[in-house]
Image (cartoon, rainbow, N blue to C red):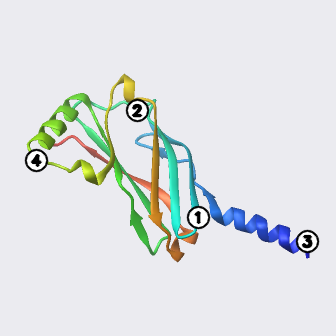
Amino acid sequence: MKKILNIGIIVLLFVLAMPLMSQQIYKGQISIASGEMIREGDFLYVHMIIDMSGLRLDKNRSLTLAPLLTNGSHDKELPDVLINGTTRHKAYLRAQALGGGKSANTSYSVVKLDRKSKGPLHYKQTIPYEKWMDTAHLDIKEDLCGCG
């Protein structure tokens, strides 16, 4: 009986703390340093550390990192991270001031890529838990933009 209880506890801990796979993003210049998905009650907590220390991005470009929780048949997009080059960030701020462009409310974080921002970014989200998330994993979609 004690053996069954121990196995049950191990399985429960495995299901509740699903580690994220290390993923190389944007030519290997960005990596997920650590990450986890933890279910507590009716919520799923997603936490990852996005390491941008090796990122080199042209000053006129922007890179969008969009986390996607998926199990193959169900998808849940999480708020994205927008990384701007220095010139691109000025255009972004100008568009925000004029009321146009992508709303800052749709992004988790907007980062101007410079020496100060080349450190880790802690990404944390809490979403309502659904049964299909038991077998889900987290992917990061990337979108590089250099357009006007």
Give the residue type that dot 1 points to: Glu
The residue located at (27%, 40%) in the rendering is 62
Give the residue type that dot 4 points to: Gly
Position of 65 compared to 73: left or right? left
Front position among marks 2 and 1: 1
Mark 2 and mark 1 residues within 8 Å of each other at the beta carbon = no
Mark 4 and mark 2 residues within 8 Å of each other at the beta carbon = no
The spot of residue 147 in percent (x, y) is: 17, 43
Q: Is residue 133 above or below residue 52?
A: below
The quarter of the picture where the C terminus appears is: top left
In whole angstroms, how far apart are the C-alphas of marks 1 and 4?
Answer: 38 Å
| Residue at the disc numbered 3 | 2
Which of the two labelled residues, at mark 2 and mark 1, occupies the earlier sequence position? 1
Q: Nearer the viewer, residue 67 or 106?
A: 106
The residue located at (11%, 48%) in the rendering is 100
Which of the two labelled residues, at mark 1 and mark 4, occupies the earlier sequence position? 1
| Residue at the disc numbered 2 | 55
Query: Does dot 3 land on a helix, a strand or a loop?
Result: helix
Q: Is residue 8 above or below residue 143?
A: below
In whole angstroms, how far apart are the C-alphas of marks 2 and 1?
Answer: 34 Å
| Residue at the disc numbered 1 | 40
The spot of residue 138 in percent (x, y) is: 49, 58
| Residue at the disc numbered 4 | 99
Which of the two labelled residues, at mark 1 and mark 3, occupies the earlier sequence position? 3
Query: Does dot 4 land on a helix, a strand or a loop?
Result: loop
Which of the two labelled residues, at mark 2 and mark 3, occupies the earlier sequence position? 3
Give the residue type that dot 2 points to: Leu
Residue placed furthest toward the top:
115
Query: Does dot 2 land on a helix, a strand or a loop?
Result: loop
In whole angstroms, how far apart are the C-alphas of marks 2 and 3?
Answer: 50 Å
